[in-house]
Image (cartoon, helix red, strand yellow):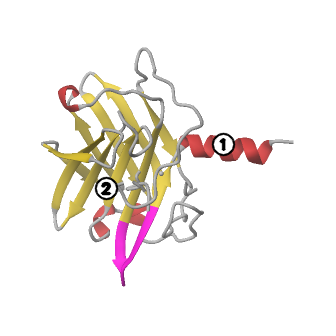
Amino acid sequence: MLAAVAALVLLVACSSGGTGDEAAEPAALTVPTPPPGGDRCSDVTGDLGESTKESGTLGEPAGIDLVETSAELTDAGLEVRFRVAGPPGSVPDPTFFVFQGPSGRAGSFEIQTELEAGSRVVTLITYDGTTTATRTTLPVPVVVEGDEVSYVVPPELVPPIVTRYWAWGSRAPVGAGVTLIDDCDPFAQAAASSTTTAP
């Protein structure tokens, strides 16, 4: 379900480095000791929309419709994966995001992966708590295979992990000035579940 992120528009959600709307912020962020190994998220299909403020209802383009996402810290670095409902290569200029911490929060960062005109660019965006966002292109190869996009950021290029909050998103222009987005936010999903099941 679309979260109210990334920054999606999320996330790009998320700020100057995101899509327009910001990632949903957890009620309380903790500084993990030791840092967590990452997180993963499952998302329903057919929930693409033009905003992260409400659930979308579109299933196309399936190449940005998130199904499973993950970010895991290993000896190799930060391993990031996006599995979508269709071939991402069938979508014009798709972008995929992973957020560590709420977009724009000091100490938070996001990584954008753009698949444009055959190129695959990975950009790290860091925040200092102001309106300033620092963008750095990472020399990281991106693998697009079947319905999955993945890459590994080497340990020396991964900023400090300062919260337990992770979120993911995607977007793609679909013409006439319209951009469709999807997001996967475990915190928002947990909050929605609690609200739904509360007596």
Residue 61 circle label: none
| Secondary structure that dominates the magenta span | strand
Tell me the quarter of the image containing the C terminus. Answer: top right
Q: Position of residue 114 (x, y in %)?
A: 25, 57
Q: Label 2 to label 1, Cα distance in Å?
A: 27 Å
Q: Residue 34 lies in magenta, yes or no?
A: no
**Residue 86 in view in this figure:** no
Q: According to the image, label 1 marks what residue?
A: 191
Q: Which one is in front, 27 or 152?
A: 27
Residue name at image x 38 percent, y 63 percent = 171
Mark 1 Cα within 10 Å, few/some/many (few <14, many 20+)?
few
Q: What amino acid is labelled 1 in the image?
A: Ala
Q: According to the image, label 2 marks what residue?
A: 16
Q: Earlier along the polypeptide chain: callout 2 or callout 1?
A: 2
Q: Position of residue 131 (x, y in %)?
A: 33, 49
Q: Is residue 27 above or below residue 146?
A: above
Q: Which one is in front, 90 or 126?
A: 126
Local secondary structure at mark 2: loop
Front disc: 2 or 1: 2
Q: Which one is in front, 62 or 126?
A: 126
Q: Position of residue 194 (x, y in %)?
A: 73, 41
Q: Which residues are magenta?
A: 172-181
Residue name at image x 27 percent, y 30 percent = 159
Direction right: furthest residue = 199
**Residue 112 in view in this figure:** yes
Local secondary structure at mark 1: helix
Q: Quadrant of residue 63?
A: bottom left
